[in-house]
Amino acid sequence: HMNSSFKSPNISHTHTLTNIKDHIKIWLLTQNISTPMKSSTSAFDLNEEIEVWPHAISTESNTVIYDHITLKSVLAHYTGQAIQQINTQKTVLGKPYLVDFPKLYFSVSHTKNFSCIAVSNIGEIGIDIENEQSTLKDQDLPFTALSANEQAYCLTQANQRQAFFSIWTAKEALLKAIGCGLNAPLSDFSVLPDGQSYHFIPHTAAFESLQTRFKHYLTEDGIHVTYCILT
């Protein structure tokens, strides 16, 4: 039971790595945009860093259909290859990479009604997308998984739920950029929101050498999208 109105991204030419410098792009996959979705995506529409891609959804689960073909069709725009030539593998820790283009980095994340793919040629990238309107009640949010600094920051904010998701997406994005997912203890570092960016504070030697660059987006509907690049 699939909506058959799948559309390919609206790109008129292939971006090869030779003609783009310091590139970051977030492909936001959403169900075909109708009135209820407009407010969700309006925060992104005018930002060249984000491309909103109306996408097929599964009518059964009401989630965006995301599959390897979707990812490969995005990556093919950068590599100039045919979709079937795109060869992705995973590191020992499970981080996916492009075998033929190891300097083209990408990361994928999903939440209900949205998926996103981040692509960069600057450095390893991780992305996380979360919907703060999730079914989790405030008291069930894992505040205690945050570092002491982050918990203290949340307590100072009028909207603690929003503060939590802002921090959570940045932490997950960083761990995905490193390639260890949620295997590292979340309290080993802090990310404290600062406008659209974050102050990164390492608490263990393993994180001290990292040079990070973050960006956070928030729609009026409470969709948080944060990426982290290791520079």
Image (spheres, rainbow, N blue to C red):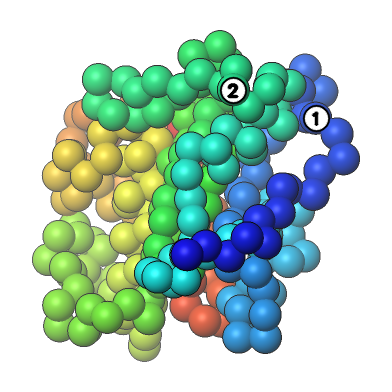
Q: What mark, if any, has residue 14 been given in the picture?
A: 1
Residue depth check, mark 2 versus mark 1: number of the one nearer the observer? 2
Residue 135 visible in this rendered orientation of the protein: yes
Which amino acid does the dot numbered 1 rest on?
Thr
- Of the residues under marks 2 and 1, which one precedes in the sequence? 1
Residue at x 71% of width, y 54% of height: 7
The residue identified by callout 2 is 84
| Residue at (49, 56) in percent of width and height | 65
The residue lying at 53 percent from left, 28 percent from top is: 105
- Where on the picture, by quarter, is residue 219? bottom right
Against 128, is 180 above or below?
A: above
Residue drawn at x 51%, y 18% as measured from the top left: 87
Q: Is residue 156 left or right of residue 16?
A: left
Tell me the element at label 1. loop
Q: Residue furthest front?
A: 1
Relative to 221, is 150 on the left or the right?
left
Q: Position of residue 139 (x, y in %)?
A: 15, 83
| Amino acid at the residue labelled 2 | Gln
- Measured along the vertical axis of the image, is residue 171 above or below residue 230? below
Residue 167 located left or right of residue 79: left
Q: Nearer the viewer, residue 22 or 76?
A: 76
